[in-house]
Image (cartoon, rainbow, N blue to C red):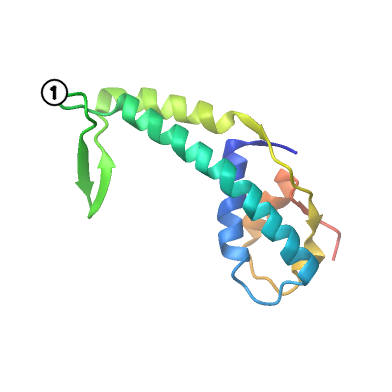
Amino acid sequence: MQLKNSEVLDIAAALSIITPQPGIFVPAALKLRRLRKELIKEQETIDEMRIDLLKLHCTKDEEGTPVMKTVEGQQSYDIPEDALEVFNKEFQQLLEETVEVNIEPFSASRLDNVQVSVNMLDRLIDIGILLDDGS
């Protein structure tokens, strides 16, 4: 299945909510497990590319080492205001790139006891991961 990188990240976010819940039937749980394993690889690749973009556009010291800043107790790359627009544009392009992911859609009825927001459900159906079987 062809997915945009942004869709990979959306599905991964949905899985982080769905997979810890009890009451998922075994066939669906197995598909979710395979899906999660497949997406972890893609998610790691996207994150590596995002970090490469951050390193490219961030402030560097005299030795060319990226400068880090602390925001609300979290370390982050220091991106100057003039480079932020370019970084955002390139990151958006990255999110629009497609990847081939070896996954099969599955029926929403297999997630009978799972709680998920309507927005997330819509997104999973729109992407084609979850099939609306009318149940």
Q: Is residue 17 above or below residue 127?
A: below
Q: Position of residue 112 (x, y in %)?
A: 76, 71
Q: Position of residue 33 (x, y in %)?
A: 68, 60
The quadrant in which residue 116 appears is: bottom right
Q: Position of residue 35 (x, y in %)?
A: 68, 53
Q: Position of residue 26 (x, y in %)?
A: 77, 70
The quarter of the picture where the C terminus appears is: bottom right
Q: Residue furthest left?
A: 62
Left or right: where 102 falls relative to 76: right
Q: How many marks?
A: 1
Residue 60 or residue 70, whichever sits in front: 60
Disc 1 residue crowd, few under 14, some 14–19, many 20+, Cα 10 Å: few
Left or right: where 80 falls relative to 48: left
What amino acid does circle 1 point to? Glu
Q: Secondary structure at mark 1?
A: loop
Residue 59 or residue 126, whichever sits in front: 59
Query: At 76% across and 64% down in the image, what residue appears?
Result: 28
The quadrant in which residue 42 appears is: top right
Query: At 52% across and 29% down in the image, what residue appears?
Result: 94
The quarter of the picture where the N terminus appears is: top right
Q: Residue furthest right?
A: 134
| Residue under label 1 | 62
Query: At 61% across and 43% down in the image, what residue appears?
Result: 8
Query: At 74% across and 63% down in the image, what residue appears?
Result: 30
